[in-house]
Image (spheres, rainbow, N blue to C red):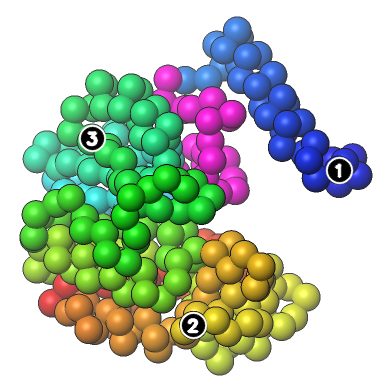
Amino acid sequence: MLTQLLPQFLKKPMKQAYTNAIDYGELLLGFRDVLTPPRSRIFIGAGDYKVVGQEFKRHFINIGGLQPHESVLDVGCGIGRMAVPLTDYLTAPGRYEGFDIVGHGIDWCLHNITPRFTNFNFQVADIYNSHYNPSGNYQAYNYRFPFDDNSFDFVFLTSVFTHMPVQEVDHYLSEISRVLKPGGRCFSTFFLLNDQSRRLMKTENSTYNFQYKLDGRYVFSLEDPDLGTAFDQSTIQTMLGRYGLSAQNFIYPGSWCGRRNTATFQDIVVAYKR
C-alpha cells in the first residue's frame, strides 16, 4: 500500500486528514446516524464500529446470558461501541454504567447516548496511561471502581485485559468481584496460552506470537509490552478463584492464533460469582 511508503511522522496526519474528509462527506450527505461517532473520534480497536458492537451484543446475550432487565457495567467503554447496540435491548429496571480513561470518548457518549437513553451513564476514570491519559492521577492497580458492592448483574471488558500487566488484571478482578452481585457474570476477553494456543501461535496462521515472558505475562513487543498481553490460562483461572469467581467450562477459544470456527478473535471467558 502507498501508506507503507510514507515516513512514520506523516502517517498519523494523513490518516487524520482522510478520516476528517470522510466525516465531512457523511455529514453533508446525511449518511451517519446520531449514534455513530465520527471516524476521526474513534480511538478503539479494529473493525467497523457498528458491526463489532452488534457482534458482541449477540455474544453478551447468547454466551453471557445477558437479560434486558439486568444492571450492566462496561469497564473500558471507549466511545460507546458496546453501549450503542445495548440501547435497544436494556429496559428499565435494566441499566448501563460505563467508564473509560479517555475523556473525549466519554464526552461523546454523554452528549449523544445519555440524553436519548437516560438509563445509560458514563464517567471518566482518572487512571494513568502512557498512551491515552498521561496526566492521570491513579494507577490501575489500586483504582477503586466508583460503584457500591453487589451492584451489577453483568460486568464486561472487551480487549482490556489484553493490554494490562498481571498486577492490574489481578486488581481489576478483585474489583469486579466486589461490584458483582452473587450469581452475577463477568464477560471478558483475553489471549490465553495453553498447549493448543502455544503450538498454533508459532505457525504462519497466527496473528500474534507472544514469545517474550515479562513479569508474569507474555508479550510480542518488549519495546511496548502493553500493545498486546497474553496469560497462561491457569494463571487467569487461579486469579478468578482467588476472588470467588469461576469460569470452569465457560472459556470460548478465539481465532487469534489461527483457530477456525470460533466465536470471535480473542478468547472469551465468562466467570460467575459464587
Residue range (magenta)? 34-54
Which residue is the site of mark 2?
215
Q: Is label 3 or label 2 in front?
A: 2
Front residue of 48/172: it is: 172
Q: Between marks 3 and 2, how big is the CA–CA gap?
A: 37 Å
What separation in Å lies between label 3 and label 1 (alpha carbons)?
A: 42 Å
Residue type (three-letter) at the residue carrying disc 3? Phe
Up the image or down, 115 lies above or below 217; here it is: above
Q: Amino acid at mark 2?
A: Asp
Residue shown at 61%/86% (left/top)? 198
Q: Earlier in the sequence, mark 3 or mark 1?
A: 1
Quadrant where the C terminus is found in the figure: bottom left
Q: Amino acid at mark 1?
A: Pro
**Residue 255, percent from left and from top:** 59, 69
Q: Mark 1 sits on what residue?
A: 7
Tally the marks: 3
Q: Quadrant of residue 180 in the image?
A: bottom left
| Residue drawn at 31 percent across, 46 percent down | 125
Q: Horizontally, is 258 left or right of 195 in the view? A: right
Tell me where residue 219 sits by quadrant: bottom right
Q: Is residue 36 magenta?
A: yes
Residue corresponding to mark 3: 120
Q: Quadrant of residue 20?
A: top right
Q: Specify whether residue 57 is in view.
A: no
Compared with 42, 125 (above or below) is below
- In the rendered image of this protein, does residue 270 appear above or below residue 106? below
- Image x and y of residue 47, in percent: 59, 46
The question of residue 145 being in magenta is answered with no
In the rendered view, would you say 84 is above or below 126?
Answer: above
State the mark number for residue 130. none
